[in-house]
Each structure stands twice: as structure tokens, then as C-alpha cells.
Amino acid sequence: MICGRGLAAQWKRERKDDYKSIKGTRIVKITQINDCILFPVKFHWYEKASLELIKKSMEELFLFSQQNPNAKVYLPQVGCGFGERD
């Protein structure tokens, strides 16, 4: 799991037990952990956000929302900030 800076780092600090359960895992698709959906945007914390990975994650999130119509999804500007895709 890549948790460098920004939102991922905040999640890591606030959800330590959830982070421990996936530490060392490379996440390249949306992944549900308890009540959180991890939305990968880059392969390594130091890289710019990958447009291909963002597109793949968006497609998977769309399928998730169709399968879970009552789920609430809050999504910041994906890939912006430390992803350098402003």
C-alpha cells in the first residue's frame, strides 16, 4: 500500500489497524477495507498520479456504486495536490 503524503497519509494515521492489515500490499484497483474504499492514483508515492490508473479506478468505482446503490461516495479532486495533476 502506497501511503506517501496527502489523503493517503491522513488515512494511514487515522486508520492504523486498517493500514496494518494491508501494509506491504500493492493496491492497483479500488479496494474496500471496512467502511473505506481505497482509490489508487499512483504506483509509487514519489510519482505523479497515473492517468491510466485513475481511469481504471474510476471505472471500478462506477461498478462498485452500481452494485451498492445505497453507498455514499465522497471523492476529492483525484490526482491533484501531491499527485501533481492539477
Image (cartoon, rainbow, N blue to C red):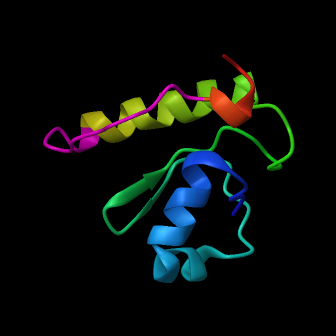
x 38%, y 58%: residue: 36
Q: Is residue 70 left or right of residue 11?
A: left
Q: How many marks?
A: 0
Q: Is residue 83 left or right of residue 40?
A: right
Q: Position of residue 85 (x, y in %)?
A: 71, 20
Q: Is residue 72 magenta?
A: yes
Q: Quadrant of the N terminus?
A: bottom right
Q: Main secondary structure of the magenta part?
A: loop
x 75%, y 74%: residue: 24
Residue 16 higher or lower than 36, as above or below: below
Does any portion of residue 29 appear in the rendered image? Answer: no
Does any portion of residue 30 appear in the rendered image? Answer: yes
Q: Position of residue 73 (x, y in %)?
A: 29, 39
Residue 10 higher or lower than 7, as above or below: below
Observer-nearest residue: 11 or 68? 11
Observer-nearest residue: 7 or 74? 7
Q: Quadrant for residue 40, please give it.
A: top right
Q: Position of residue 17 (x, y in %)?
A: 48, 83
Q: Residue furthest left?
A: 70
Q: Is residue 47 magenta?
A: no
Q: Position of residue 6 (x, y in %)?
A: 61, 47
Q: Quadrant of the C terminus?
A: top right
Residue 67 higher or lower than 37, as above or below: above
Q: Is residue 28 left or right of residue 19?
A: right
x 74%, y 40%: residue: 42
x 61%, y 24%: residue: 55
Residue 79 higher or lower than 71, as above or below: above
Q: Residue furthest top?
A: 86
- Span shown in magenta: 67-78
